[in-house]
Image (spheres, helix red, strand yellow):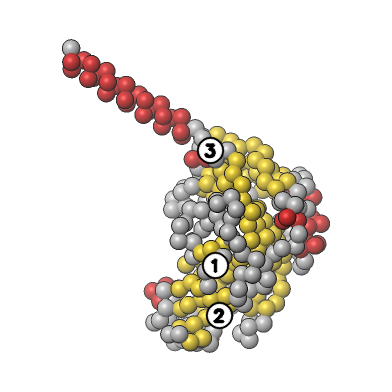
Amino acid sequence: MHSMKFYIFLLTVFLFHACSNEKKSKDPSDYVDYVVMGKSVNHRQDFSGKLELLNTVFFAEIFPTDLTSSKVTVTNGKLTGPGEAREGLYFSTDRIPFLAGQREMTIEKLSERYPDGTYNFSFNTPVGSIEKFPVSFSDQSKKNNNPNPIKITLSQNGEEVNINAVNSNNDLKVSWSEFTIGSNDPNEIIDDMIYVILGDCMGNEIAHSGHAISDPEALTFDKTEFIIKSTVLSPGRPYQLEVEHSNMETAINSNIEIIVTKAATSFLDFRTQGEDLNACPELPFAMDGGQTDRVKK
């Protein structure tokens, strides 16, 4: 009799957990961590430190909860809204779905194409779809409050280094001009962010400072440097850096966080000392769509 009661107890516990897991797995937020929408101003920094405006861009992204998996779990992404998004803009089929609108040279011209209104995300997950998930530029974000253009500095062993003579045997410190309008998030979701991305000559990302929300070690607005380990560098090769300052507003809906950003990005090439044992193009292939002055692989 006691053994039968114990069996019923175990069966009840099993069914409870099975039902709980089944219920949880039906929520699309188990597959989508957060969405991003924003406008960015992109610059190229040359050897002398001069910044040249490349373009401005309207963009959106959908970040899955598991960034370590190569499996695509968010599909059929579409964004609708005012201006040129009225008929719908379609996300890429990448693991992190991404879209970029037609680029312009000023934020004012960009906003004629993509006004600061409410846009709607739609996408599929393995357990259901999200339709017309609203994301809005607030009244505050309608101002031209993109961060100032970013000046990047490279240092090794405590001294600024020539961008054409980086020593691949030493760690490389990347620092940047002040993020003057960066601040804490009043909603306590995520503070304004800084991103540093390193790419190789073929346009492949080989180092990243960390994504918002999912990476507790990611760089916030008050950070001043990022260290690129020497282990990712090789002699005699061109590399490309991307540094972004992201002025963000946040919200949450249906357990999915929302980030709306006005951002600034600078791109800088550097080269390591020594002989290149592998064939590299003189100028790296574009790692980011904002590099409209570079060829895509």
**Marks 3 and 1, how far apart at CA:** 33 Å
Q: Position of residue 255 (x, y in %)?
A: 54, 40
Depth check: give the residue in front, 68 or 238. 68
Label pair 2/3, CB-CB below 8 angstroms = no
Depth check: give the residue in front, 247 or 231. 247
Dot placed on the residue nearer the N-terminal end, 3 or 1: 3
Residue 108 picture quarter: bottom right
Residue pointed to by mark 1: 222
Query: In terms of secondary structure, where does tag 1 sit?
Result: loop
Mark 3 closeness class: few <14, some 14–19, many ≥20 residues within 10 Å: many
Residue pointed to by mark 3: 28
Q: Amino acid at mark 1?
A: Asp
- Could you tell me if residue 195 is visible in this image? no
Residue pointed to by mark 2: 153
Query: In terms of secondary structure, where does tag 2 sit?
Result: strand
Q: Position of residue 202 (x, y in %)?
A: 53, 70
Is residue 9 shown above or below 175?
above
Dot placed on the residue nearer the N-terminal end, 2 or 3: 3
- Could you tell me if residue 226 is visible in this image? yes
Label pair 3/1, CB-CB below 8 angstroms = no
